[in-house]
Image (cartoon, rainbow, N blue to C red):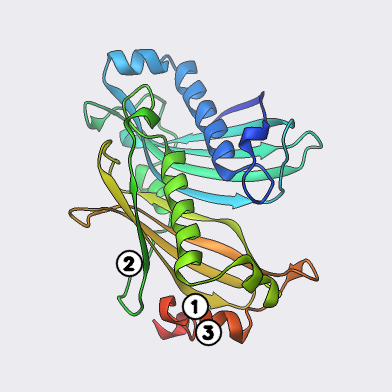
Amino acid sequence: MAVTEEQHVRTRFSDLDTQRHTTSRTYEDSCLGERYKLLEGAGYSWKRMIEESVRLQTIGADIRFLAQQMENTNLSVRTSLSSGADGFLVFTQEVVDPSGKVAAEIRTLARTEKEGKPFPIFPVQESAEALVSSFESVTPFSGRCERASVNRDLFFCERNPFGEYNPSHYWRLLEEGRWNFTAECGLSLDDLVAMDTTLFYMGGKIRYHKPLVAGQKATVKTWIRSFEKIWSRMRQEITDSETGEVLAESLDDLLVVSVSKSRPKKAGEDMLKVFSKVTEFPEGEGEK
């Protein structure tokens, strides 16, 4: 198992989002850089990878956010790597603040490929099946509710040196879908204050199926899978706007929080009513 620890990123004002803390994409981009450092340490810099048609294909990510960070903060990333047959890799990463507190955990399933075929770079430590099975699949949509939907352009200028989109671009699209979901449900900031309720995105599971194609549009579909006590389980799909093919999907954990008391609370009847048409299992997972 390869392990690194790098004091390598300082958050900036431009990393802050509308909720006035560092956006999740900053964490993912920082972790991505560390993943490529491990590949470089094994002899494959990103430049060599381009020259030899080697790619790091991201398959899935399990994410947890634990402590908000502000601008001008020095963060370190701790990375451990488990390697399997057929080029499968699992990167387990922690983003740590100056006090040693873990701000985020990102666990990524990926595979190294050469010209689209498996291309192992690291010695095999575990079976490919063991690594892949440690990432649960996301249950397909049952069709039992409506879904909010929004189209977004895929810009040429936002691709990486491989001519592809980094995983954080999928994160951006999913975040756009969450904002659109709130808007389509007719919820304003004043409405949330009146309900004494807000939702905090605490992490979830993302599964990447197909690459995004520059110059085209992606459709982001968003709905609530269920409410479970103080949790809202949100489902999202990124699809090809023309074919409807699912390019990526997620199951997210949103914590229901009282605005006045700043602590978790069970979703109230007023919130359940607002989301009733876009909730797949309104009576809970037992209804599936």
Q: Residues within 10 Å of mark 1 (few under 14, many from 20)?
A: many
Q: Quadrant of the N terminus?
A: top right
2 or 1: tag closer to the N-terminus: 2
Q: Nearer the viewer, residue 267 or 56?
A: 267
Instruction: Point out the frontmost of discs 3 and 2.
Output: 3
Could you tell me the amino acid type at mark 3?
Answer: Lys
Residue 197 or 284: which is nearer the viewer? Answer: 197
Q: Residue furthest left?
A: 243
Q: In screen coordinates, is 78 left or right of 63?
A: right
Q: Position of residue 141 (x, y in %)?
A: 33, 70
Q: Residues within 10 Å of mark 2 (few under 14, many from 20)?
A: few
Label 3, on which residue?
Answer: 273
- The residue singled out by tag 1 in the image is 275
Q: Is residue 10 above or below residue 196?
A: above
Q: Secondary structure at mark 3?
A: helix
Image-quadrant location for residue 260: bottom right
Mark 2 to mark 1: distance in Å? Answer: 20 Å
